[in-house]
Amino acid sequence: MNNSVTNTARLLGAGLRALLVLTLVTGVIYPLVVTGIAQAAFHDKANGSETKSQGKVVGSSLIGQQGYSLDYFQGRPANGLGSNSVNTRYKLILSGATNLAADNKVLIRQVQAARAAVVKDNSVPGYPVTPSQVPADAVTSSGSGLDPDISPAYAQLQVRRVAERNHLPVTSVERLVKDHTTGRTLGFVGEPRVNVLELNIALKDLTRGS
Amino acid sequence: MGPVTAAVLQLAALIGALALCYIPFGTYMARVYTSDRHWRIEKWIYKGIGADPDTEMRWPAYLRGVLAFSLIGVLFLYLLQRLQGVLPGSLGFDSVDPAQSFNTAVSFVTNTNWQSYYGEQTMGHVVQTAGLAVQNFVSAAVGIAVAVALVRGFARSRTGEIGNFWADLVRGTVRILVPFATVAAVVLVACGAIQNFSGIHEVGQFMGGSQQWNGGAVASQEAIKELGTNGGGYFNANSAHPFENPTPFTNLFEIFLILLIPFALTRTFGVMVGSVKQGYAILATMFTIWLSFVALMMWTEFAHHGAALQAAGGAYEGKEVRFGIGGSSIFAVSTTLTSTGAVDSFHSSFTGLGGGITMLSMMLGEIAPGGTGSGLYGILVMAVIAVFIAGLMVGRTPEYLGKKIGAREIKLSAIYILITPALALVFTAASMALPTPPHSMLNPGAHGFSEVLYAFTSAANNNGSAFAGLNANTDWYNTMTGLAMLFGRFLPMVFVLALAGSLAEQKPVPATAGTLRTEKPLFTGLLVGAILIITGLTYFPALALGPLAEGLAS
């Protein structure tokens, strides 16, 4: 009995020492080495790809934002975004999806409402938008709620509204969208996309310049 | 080019990359576990542990090492979370409450990485890097160690000795996981994943006002999270979060990392048992199931059945534009057919059948290709069962790799394959029968049941992904998924190591004309069939109530 207690204690001691040594290797040295390389070689990216507009930081090119006025291009809905409920001294953005099922009535209503809004917002005199023109990404929430991109189809759908509200020629807004459309990586990885923040920064520069 | 063609090309590129790495990486891993030389850093580590890496262990000693190390891991991680409030470098976050700390500690030690917490509002730098990420490494190394011990059981004869646990643990960490994770982490940062230790800071917004972000050692954690098939995200949105998975390329790269070790371990197995063809037969089984499931997933997601998805005109709910339907489908199948559980899109909003595929993937026992190590030992146990079934058909004593599969081996294997289904189904049934647990469901109807079934399937199989609408941060789910993870990880290991010991003691039987050739396509077919039939029969009633009911109604 005494012997087995000693053996167990010795074994647990070995386990504890193994964990501490491996914590030093994988939990201290490894992240510090990676951070060192990252900060030296990819400083901007390692710190969140911050983007400036007219000299001021206006966010990260990787993180989608909500609340653009209709003068600007709109991002995707983000009904899954949450707000911090544990450490309420911070206003951290809580990433997340809606997790609503494909047959959930709440989701059906969200999609229908979003579609109606897209049709209404983007119909300009002489150029009505029909519901069937609205692409899927315009009416669904992304996985993170922070999707920085929209499909080129959704950007194209917004061109006339944006042109009219900013008193710009349609062709120059179209060119802006085209310049900010990223194709598939190597031609086949991922989907074509338009970064909404970068597009809006360029739009702002264009309106200020004219 | 349409999205379907692009998806198929992505799949082809992924398969090509995995194929290129298969032989060199699998052979390298075999050398890691058979070499009798120690690296200098490893000698220092052994000195720190106070263990002699050259002492061979019989299976009970090996198992004691696994259990002692894991128990210490759970206690340490539990205490770290409980003390977070007073630890420096914690972003000012409070200590995690007891039930959630227990759940999270068990979750990361068992390679599950089920998360009932929101990463960005709960865990500070110290717990993330020195607690959670450490278990990402060592739980993966423990998994590979147990698999290698089983392989030694097949490879050795007339000895009960199956290796030294401390040596296997340290070598897996130092020679495989740390170097490859370092390279992968740098690649991720180069593409935009963040890697810093800054605090919570305000960043301006385009329309005015500001948003608050927290920094973190995200890329370093992301790399090992995928390579070690762990899956616990730094942020709540996991690999859908742009700071974890910024581009279409990183998405494909992360899928590659998830699949790299589990597939290549079949080569390691082949080399160690002295017949790489045996490894190819196991690889072919894994690959057949994985590829068929990816194809099925792409079909159902591109078809986007389901009223809300039809109304939207595409299955984009819970998916990111940059990954698209194709990238999200490959990721979803790869993460659930391994024990990863990282997600780049949210399975709860997939089509009914798509959600069913993610569940069935886990229910197969995560063996195609499975978790790091756990995939290989899981499928080898299924191979023993398949050989036994074939033996019954022709009335011969079954053999596998020159070892007789006798009553003892069959008992150990049969108990092994009963454990996870029993855990998943009993805990699900209990949750449905009790008055309060169903209140955690977000969605009504069949999908609500699927959320609970998914949770316990994920926990018992050590996956960690979720139909995340379920509110799992309750005492019931924190405790019960915690127990399912513990039993689902360590009970099977007991039987695997016992099987390894039993096989290692045998003397080899020479192959005769009547021996089933386990390196041939016929055996691969038999093994695929056995896996699908045994799992299908076990889970079919539960699947019919959940995802099948939802999928067929739409």
Image (cartoon, coloured by chain):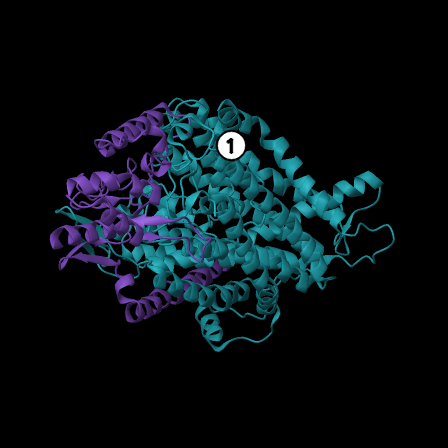
Apparent side of residue B545 relative to residue B92 in the rendered image (left or right): right
Q: Residue furthest right?
A: B513
Apparent side of residue B7 relative to residue A180 in the rendered image (left or right): right
Residue B94: in sight, yes or no?
A: no
Residue B434 sits in quarter:
top left
For the residue pair A195 and B69, the one nearer the viewer reads as A195
Residue linked to disc 1: B353
Where residue B349 sits in the image (x, y, percent)?
41, 34
Q: Count of labels shown?
A: 1
Q: Residue at x 30, y 59 (%)?
A: B194
For the residue pair B146 and A71, the one nearer the viewer reads as A71
User: What kind of residue is marked 1?
Assistant: Leu
Q: Residue furthest bottom?
A: B40
- Give the letter of the cyan chain: B
Which chain contains the residue that carries disc 1? Answer: B
Neighbours of disc 1 within 10 Å: few (<14), some (14-19), many (20+): many
Where residue B38 sits in the image (x, y, percent)?
54, 75
Where residue B407 sits in the image (x, y, percent)?
74, 44
For the residue pair B248 and B106, the one nearer the viewer reads as B248
Asked if residue B530 is positioned above or below residue B201 in the image, the reply reads: above
Asked if residue B231 is positioned above or below residue B152 in the image, the reply reads: above
Apparent side of residue A96 relative to residue B529 in the rendered image (left or right): left
Tint applied to chain A in the drawing: purple
Where residue A52 sits in the image (x, y, percent)?
18, 58
Residue B542 sits in quarter:
top right
For the residue pair B465 and A162, the one nearer the viewer reads as A162
Apparent side of residue B14 relative to residue B395 in the rendered image (left or right): left
Residue B105: in sight, yes or no?
A: yes
- SS label for mark 1: helix
